[in-house]
């Protein structure tokens, strides 16, 4: 069988097949390997948010693998930013797995990265040896390890005293977007102003972006949140230290009362992780940042997310 593998401008008609593909691939992989397929729900519809958001944010940057008859057998979302190319979810149909489709789709993105002279970054599950191996075979180097923490926030909010610094957190506006991008670049060596503008504009999906400022007015952190019912998740974010990270996290959780939320916390941020346990968070998975060229001397705490990715 010969598949056509190429960057594609997704049409509205592609959204549903891609949602079905993502749902099937995840349910199949997590059920057959870990007996955890049920965590992705019993309907593909929530996964339509991925093509909707990515096509709005980065038209034409999704790589698809299509059969001769035009059926989508694989997808690999990518997004070029100022400093790097990020790769989003990669998935192949279960019946098309193990014959190199994911590798070929990734190769398209890596070729582009080489052409434009930028490193490629992604977040990879540590429970999924197939994807971990796929990425490291292609030259990605694992870095920071994250624990995916699930927390149920009661309707009345978390029954804890707000941590110090929550009064320094507020909702970001368009005037903050460049400062937030500057801050991330100083801390982490990556820049992606477009994502922050997308959150503040809030036209596709449902986003909120928080900013934390020190007493002198400088940025000490930021944290995005997806409020969409199809994807309730905290991230992306970066904080200067545990205190700023904890304050941002508390404010984000407080804004999502009555929901179950997942966030990824760096395992090395021991103080923040301990606080999250005290708030009732439980570990549900582990992820690792992978890059073709890790940034030397990155500082601060990162809260990655699955849409749109950072690491
Ligand atoms: C992960 C996934 C995308 C892989 O797709 P695929 O089309 O089967 O992958 P490919 O056939 O292109 O390549 C897999 C590569 O990993 C290698 N690999 C897999 N498991 C490995 C292991 N344990 N050790 C070493 N290499 C391994 C394979 O050998 C192959 O490399 P090779 O061709 O050089 O031998 C697919 O299983 C999937 O859709 N999973 C569900 C969705 C998901 O979890 N996505 C990743 C999270 S974002």
Image (tube, helix red, strand yellow):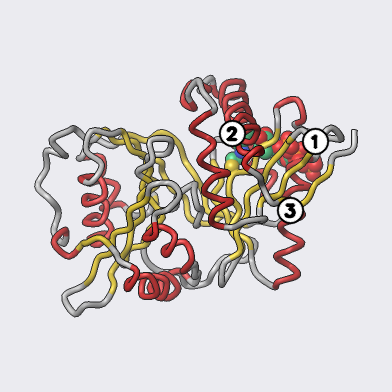
The alpha-carbon separation of the residues under discs 3 and 2 comes to 18 Å
Identify which residue, 100 or 290, lies in the foreground: 100
Identify which residue, 171 or 187, lies in the foreground: 171
Q: Position of residue 184 (x, y in %)?
A: 41, 69
Question: Label 1: which residue?
Answer: 70
The alpha-carbon separation of the residues under discs 2 and 1 comes to 16 Å
Question: Label 2: which residue?
Answer: 19
Question: Label 3: which residue?
Answer: 7
**Quadrant in the picture for residue 295:** bottom right
- First in sequence: mark 3 or mark 2? 3
Residue, x 72% and y 50% (percent of image)? 8
**Please, what secondary structure does the residue beneath circle 1 have?**
loop
Q: Are marks 2 and 1 in contact (CB under 8 Å)?
A: no
Q: Is residue 305 left or right of residue 1?
A: left
Q: Residues within 10 Å of mark 2 (few under 14, many from 20)?
A: many
- First in sequence: mark 2 or mark 1? 2
Q: Position of residue 267 (x, y in %)?
A: 39, 49
Q: Residues within 10 Å of mark 1 (few under 14, many from 20)?
A: few
**Quadrant in the picture for residue 213:** bottom left
């Amino acid at each position: 069988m010969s598949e056509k593998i190429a960057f594609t401008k997704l049409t509205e008609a592609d959204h549903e097949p891609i949602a079905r593909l993502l749902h099937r691939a995840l349910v199949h992989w997590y059920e057959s390997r870990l007996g955890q397929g049920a965590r992705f729900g019993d309907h593909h519809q929530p996964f339509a948010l991925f093509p909707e958001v990515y096509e709005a944010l980065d038209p034409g940057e999704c790589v698809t693998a299509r059969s001769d008859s035009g059926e989508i057998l694989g997808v690999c979302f990518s997004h070029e930013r100022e400093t790097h190319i990020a790769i989003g979810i990669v998935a192949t149909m279960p019946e098309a797995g193990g014959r190199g489709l994911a590798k070929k789709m990734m190769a398209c993105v890596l070729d582009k990265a080489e052409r434009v002279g930028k490193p490629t970054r992604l977040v990879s599950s540590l429970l999924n040896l197939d994807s971990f191996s796929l990425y490291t075979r292609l030259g990605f180097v694992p870095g920071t390890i994250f624990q995916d923490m699930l927390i149920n926030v009661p309707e009345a909010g978390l029954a804890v005293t707000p941590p110090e610094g929550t009064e320094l957190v507020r909702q970001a506006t368009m005037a903050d977007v460049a400062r937030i991008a500057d801050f991330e670049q100083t801390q982490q060596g990556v820049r992606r102003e477009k994502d922050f503008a997308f959150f503040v504009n809030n036209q596709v999906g449902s986003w909120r972006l928080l900013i934390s400022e020190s007493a002198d007015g400088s940025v000490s952190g930021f944290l995005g949140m997806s409020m969409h019912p199809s994807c309730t998740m905290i991230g992306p974010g970066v904080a200067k230290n545990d205190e700023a990270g904890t304050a941002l996290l508390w404010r984000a959780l407080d804004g999502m009362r009555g929901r179950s939320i997942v966030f990824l916390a760096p395992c090395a941020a021991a103080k923040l992780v301990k606080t999250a346990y005290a708030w009732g968070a439980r570990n549900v998975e582990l992820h690792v940042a992978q890059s073709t060229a890790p940034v030397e001397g990155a500082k601060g705490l990162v809260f990655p997310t699955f849409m749109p990715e950072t690491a």
